[in-house]
């Protein structure tokens, strides 16, 4: 398959655009067209896979409006910028405007092609290829490339392919229900019902009736028979969120149901059989609760046949800019508003917050900022983050800041080498002038999976 790429010189960078065109012409699988910033409406037509802006550092300020316009017209199109002599704030503004990657000139053909493939592989999904599933699958909503997150998400297809119980843990707002939906829609049960219930929202005295239903006259207010959630989910998936809120009496009945796949409606004598997969979720440590006698240990082990632990947002900070830009585009499209860009200072403010509410909190902050936006670029004053520390208070110590810069440099440097050499560790180590064993130790240290960078065959 040939990937169609447009090369757009900005600010008179025609020579650099010519070099990029020649680099892609030498590679296989790429078809190029030349354009200009004035051609963006035409370039937005379907059929184009990527746009590469060639711009000198002097013309960097002209890029954000063009990138923003293209991102609004074609959110699925890969956008790369190439130039020489860019300062860090200029590169940050390019990413804040919505570019997928920045390629420093002089151009190397194999590196440019590797960066293009990487950007095209991240469009729309930002998750490993096996998660593509249905076009409308919630798996498409996963955004992030941090190792702790990708490691959990990459397990979803295998978990969806079997029918065992699943326990999803993670702090509030990390996306447990989206994860459970992805398992359902990637599974053979996708065409059957998806039924979700928040166990903490059901009155204690009604939990058994809600789950298993009741017959007429089962209790004073039972004027007619009613099917329960288990019956509604027949053939599909029953998602029990906040499973820790179930009282011990209801836990006992749920355990029996999971073991026997049989249940009785409240007030009935007949036993019913059910074909339902149960996925449970909790933001608490169920094993610790079981140790203290607040949760049945046998139910915990029955639910925890397969497990997923979603990391908090503060442990995957490198995903924050991508998530913020994604939410900006989504909410702008829903409300038919132009999507503003994020200034480098706004991104820094997002990165320094601890996000106790995780992705959900970030989502609400971005939605509020879009609705109250005062211009085409969001700055720190536009981001209303309740409980956020002031910039001065948030300043880290010198040692911590230095360690963080070194950590980020190592990880970005290693990943860029692996992009360039398509996951070949030996070639990447040789380019870095490091012993292969030492280089591989760095890969393990940062939880990087070289296989992610190998092109699909």
Image (cartoon, grey):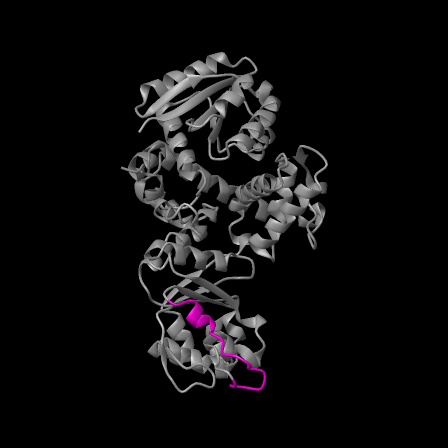
Horizontal side of residue 398 vs 101, given as left or right: right
* Direction from residue 150 to residue 389 in the image, left or right: right
Q: Residue at x 55, y 19 (%)?
A: 37
Above or below, 391 against 112 in this view is below
User: Horizontal and vertical percent for residue 13?
Assistant: 52, 14
Label total for image: 0
Q: In the orientation shown, which residue stands out farthest toward the left?
A: 457
Observer-nearest residue: 191 or 149?
191
The image shows residue 20 at horizontal and vertical percentages of 42, 19
Q: Is residue 23 left or right of residue 341?
A: left
Residue 84 in view of the camera: no
Q: Nearer the viewer, residue 410 or 188?
A: 188
Say if the magenta span includes residue 6. no
Screen quadrant of the C terminus: top left
Image location (x, y in percent) of residue 21? 40, 17
| In magenta segment, residue 226 | yes
Identity of the residue drawn at 49% across and 34% down = 100
Quadrant including the N terminus: top left
Determine the image quadrant of residue 115. top left
| Percent position of residue 270, x then y | 38, 84
Q: What secondary structure predominates along the stretch shown in magenta?
A: loop
Taking 156 as reference, is 33 above or below it? Answer: above
Give, as a single range, the part of the protein colored magenta: 217-234
Q: Is residue 38 visible?
A: yes
């Amino acid at each position: 398959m040939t990937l169609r790429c447009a090369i757009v010189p900005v600010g008179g960078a025609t020579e650099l655009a010519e070099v990029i065109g020649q680099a892609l012409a030498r590679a296989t699988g790429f078809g190029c067209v030349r354009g200009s910033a004035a051609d963006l409406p035409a370039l937005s037509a379907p059929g184009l896979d990527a746009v590469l802006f060639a711009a000198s550092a002097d013309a960097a300020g002209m890029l954000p409006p063009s990138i923003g316009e293209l991102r609004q017209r074609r959110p699925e199109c890969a956008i790369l910028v190439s130039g020489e002599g860019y300062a860090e704030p200029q590169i940050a503004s390019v990413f804040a405007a919505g570019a997928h990657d920045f390629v420093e000139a002089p151009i190397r053909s194999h590196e440019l092609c590797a960066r293009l493939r990487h950007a095209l592989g991240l469009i729309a999904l930002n998750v490993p290829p096996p998660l593509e599933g249905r076009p409308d699958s919630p798996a498409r909503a996963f955004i992030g490339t941090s190792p702790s997150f990708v490691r959990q998400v990459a397990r979803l297809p295998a978990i969806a392919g079997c029918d065992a119980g699943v326990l999803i843990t993670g702090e509030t707002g990390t996306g447990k229900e989206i994860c459970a939906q992805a398992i359902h829609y990637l599974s053979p049960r996708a065409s059957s019902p998806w039924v979700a219930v928040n166990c903490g929202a059901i009155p204690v005295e009604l939990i058994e009736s809600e789950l298993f239903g009741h017959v007429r006259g089962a209790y004073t207010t039972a004027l007619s028979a009613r099917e329960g959630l288990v019956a509604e989910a027949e053939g599909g998936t029953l998602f029990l969120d906040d499973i820790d809120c179930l009282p011990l009496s209801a836990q006992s009945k749920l355990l029996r149901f999971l073991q026997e796949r049989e249940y009785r409606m409240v007030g009935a004598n007949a036993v019913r059989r059910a074909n339902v997969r149960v996925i449970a979720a909790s933001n608490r440590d169920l094993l610790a609760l079981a140790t203290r006698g607040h949760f049945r240990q046998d139910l915990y082990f029955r639910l925890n046949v397969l497990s997923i632990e979603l990391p908090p947002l503060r442990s995957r900070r490198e995903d924050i800019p991508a998530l913020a830009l994604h939410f900006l585009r989504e909410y702008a499209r829903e409300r038919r508003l132009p999507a503003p860009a994020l200034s480098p200072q706004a991104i820094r403010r997002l990165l320094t917050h601890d996000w106790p509410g995780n992705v959900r909190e970030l989502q609400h902050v971005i939605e509020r900022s879009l609705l109250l936006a005062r211009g085409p670029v969001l700055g720190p004053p536009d981001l209303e983050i309740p409980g956020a520390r002031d910039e001065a208070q948030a300043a880290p110590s010198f040692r911590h800041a230095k360690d963080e810069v070194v950590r980020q440099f190592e990880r970005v440097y290693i990943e860029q080498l692996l992009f360039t050499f398509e996951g070949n560790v030996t070639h990447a180590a040789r380019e870095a002038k490091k012993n292969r064993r030492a280089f591989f130790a760095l890969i393990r240290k940062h939880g990087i999976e070289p296989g992610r960078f190998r092109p699909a065959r």
